[in-house]
Image: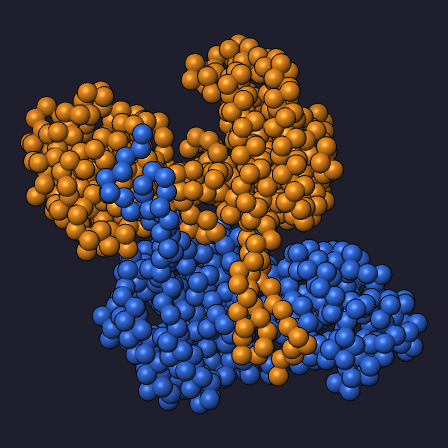
Chain colours: A orange, B blue
Amino acid sequence: MNKTEDQNGSIERYIAEVTRGAASAKSEIGRAETDTKNLALKNVAEQILASGNLLRKENSRDLKEGKDRGLNAALLDRLELNDNRIQAMADGVEQVARLPDPVGQTTPLEMRPSGIRVGKMRVAIGVILIIYESRPNVTADAAALCIKSGNATILRGGSEALHSNRAIAACIHAGLEQAGLSRNIVQLINTTDRDAVGKLLQSRRHIDLVIPRGGKGLIERISRESQIPLLKHLDGVCHVYVHEDANTTMAVEIAVNAKAQRFGVCNAMETLLVDRAIAESVLPEIRQRLELKAVELRGCTETCSLLPGIAPATEQDWHEEYLAPVLAVRIVGGISQAVEHIRTYGSHHTDAIVTDNDTAAQQFLRCVDSSSVMVNASTRFADGFEYGLGAEIGISTDKLHARGPVGLEGLTSEKFIVLGNGNIRE
Amino acid sequence: MNKTEDQNGSIERYIAEVTRGAASAKSEIGRAETDTKNLALKNVAEQILASGNLLRKENSRDLKEGKDRGLNAALLDRLELNDNRIQAMADGVEQVARLPDPVGQTTPLEMRPSGIRVGKMRVAIGVILIIYESRPNVTADAAALCIKSGNATILRGGSEALHSNRAIAACIHAGLEQAGLSRNIVQLINTTDRDAVGKLLQSRRHIDLVIPRGGKGLIERISRESQIPLLKHLDGVCHVYVHEDANTTMAVEIAVNAKAQRFGVCNAMETLLVDRAIAESVLPEIRQRLELKAVELRGCTETCSLLPGIAPATEQDWHEEYLAPVLAVRIVGGISQAVEHIRTYGSHHTDAIVTDNDTAAQQFLRCVDSSSVMVNASTRFADGFEYGLGAEIGISTDKLHARGPVGLEGLTSEKFIVLGNGNIRE
């Protein structure tokens, strides 16, 4: 009993110290010059490359403990830092240094009838808490994006990667300090105690934004517990809708790419919707091409009649984010029914229409309420790099603040600036 | 006991019905054509003007009940609907009809190396809950802004204005239905039971944004209870900082205007900061001018020496949002100390510098972390109409989503749109 109280007390003190550190560091990084931030990032990249031996050594401790704890092969693979991954991590940080600095960017000023000139200036958000699982490279990626966007960061990685994350954080701290910046700009939570997350999620006064990155379980738990706004996506139940006026070759290529180019990603198609009028012209070929890639189809009653031998889809299939070689297929009676299906079962992530009909394309763009809506392109393009953001901290399916792939700009806010010449209000 | 359970059950059912209604209405208003929305708004304005007698009659019931309950004169004044106010309410709705429609606006598309073209389209947020006090005109204002920005709205006004709000809501419903739109697009909570607010604030799945408008007590309570993101400001502890290189005449005019043009508003100055080097040149005149307007000054030790007879400020004064003819005055030793004072005591609302020194102006603009930062202008300009937003639903001192005065654009979000020509990802 006494011990538990002590531990709780010490976690509370530790989190208070971390949030105090972040609060004092946020003004410093928020006002830092672009050159200083870029120098820090280049230093971090160099430190990572120079620390290869140490990083692999610390990572091997995590891997050994993970094996002993019975982590599965996929998790162990995600956890591993090898030479290629260390190089890629350093390259990623360097790349962020080369991106334009969003902080301080100003919109054109507009002269108002009162004589004041009004515009907006981009500013950092403040303190960002990032909670993530297994992959240790997120430590470097997330820290780099937050440094560049002028935010102080608190990182809470997975307990299975703690040694690796500590070694990467040491590189970040050295890089910051070499550039004359405080190490408190990036803080790694140095305990695996789960109470620490709970305490952080209650620190509404000190933390401005929480970004959870990981599986659905993690994100749901954090959504429930957090008193701080979140930037997140839960599901990627993405649709491709083949409209009756689609080019059939294009429809087949897009459907196959959206499903099978990679399975375990949030922007892969999970349900294919096909207009009745074109179903016979496209579905047999889509089936054939996907079966070559060992994709299992589950269809509505009409689809099952058209494609004998495939399994019937249940109501649950329309909700499912398989992240696997499985595809739900439904024949619909036109664009309204397609939009309605997406409204009912979609997750506001990414949905595409294939059509040569401009009116249908415009209607789909207007009516589908997802963070990315596409015409004649594979859902797999929903990605910060593909969109030209230069980087991606995550994808948001929420509607406040940022939506879709989030890059540096999504980690900033805008304040109004007003320039006058002695103007007073009458 | 049974009765309480019944009542709770019925409130729960009522709120479930309201949120279901909003969920079904949000797609309808989100996709509505600009002309249809404008027609609805014009109808609402006409209904308000045509219902003057009824509005005054229902309002007089509220006023009578308010008097019987002992509401003070200021509250009763805010509650009152007279002919001028009814006309102003209708004019306000008409004015929103004339504003450009943000929904569907598209940024220029950018061609990416993959061949896809990427841009953003502005969309409604979804369902917005607005919780407000006394002034019944908010019912019409808020509904008009939400209709124009394509959002479904749930309005919860003060219990003291329920009869007036019901009568205004009837005008809104008639206006919507005459334009062929569903009345569920704007719903007024038709009970004064306070449990209704609690239940609404837990409806995270059905409500996308909460906007509280009212006193600090209301906003603090809602912030604590809400599981839904808020757009709000708590305090307006606004500063004017007179830099040593200020034009003294300009400094006096701005300080007097920022404090005394109107006292009870959130963008009025509450603390004046003056550089030591210029204090003797401006403070005596500022004092004289403000004392003519019966403003009481409370100063730091140095200010008190310079202006004999004024009261000393306590630590609490630097935190205070007086909303009254009182001003805290502090002499500082330069811009860094001024910025530090604002960082410590400010509320991220509006802060201004008076200076002819461009370097100081730029430093102030960069370093002061408020939703509006001004150079050589009165803080009283922090306002959606003055900034050219055409309307204002409120002011946000938060950093996520919208900051500063919020107009129609702040009630919308952006989704990515991607146009391709059969593009697939390699």
Residue A102: % across, % down: 55, 49
Residue B235: % across, % down: 64, 64
Locate the N terminus of chain A by quadrant: top right
Specify whether residue B272 is in view.
Answer: no
Q: Nearer the viewer, residue A124 or A300?
A: A124
Residue B237: % across, % down: 68, 65
- How many numbered marks have been drawn onto this rendered protein structure? 0
Task: Look at 62% across and 14% down and name the residue there.
Answer: A53
Residue A386's place in the image compared with A4, above or below, is: below
Residue B198: % across, % down: 48, 56
Relative side of B254 to B202, left or right: right
Specify whether residue A218 is in view.
Answer: yes
Q: Nearer the viewer, residue B169 or B87?
A: B87
Locate the C terminus of chain A by quadrant: bottom right
Relative side of B247 to B150, left or right: right
Residue A135's place in the image compared with B278, above or below, is: above
Task: Look at 68% across and 71% down and name the residue there.
Answer: B376
Task: Look at 43% across and 40% down and name the residue there.
Answer: A384
Residue B304's place in the image compared with A83, above or below, is: below
Task: Look at 51% across and 11% down and name the residue there.
Answer: A67
Residue A330's place in the image compared with A136, above or below, is: below
Place residue A119 in its image quadrant: bottom right
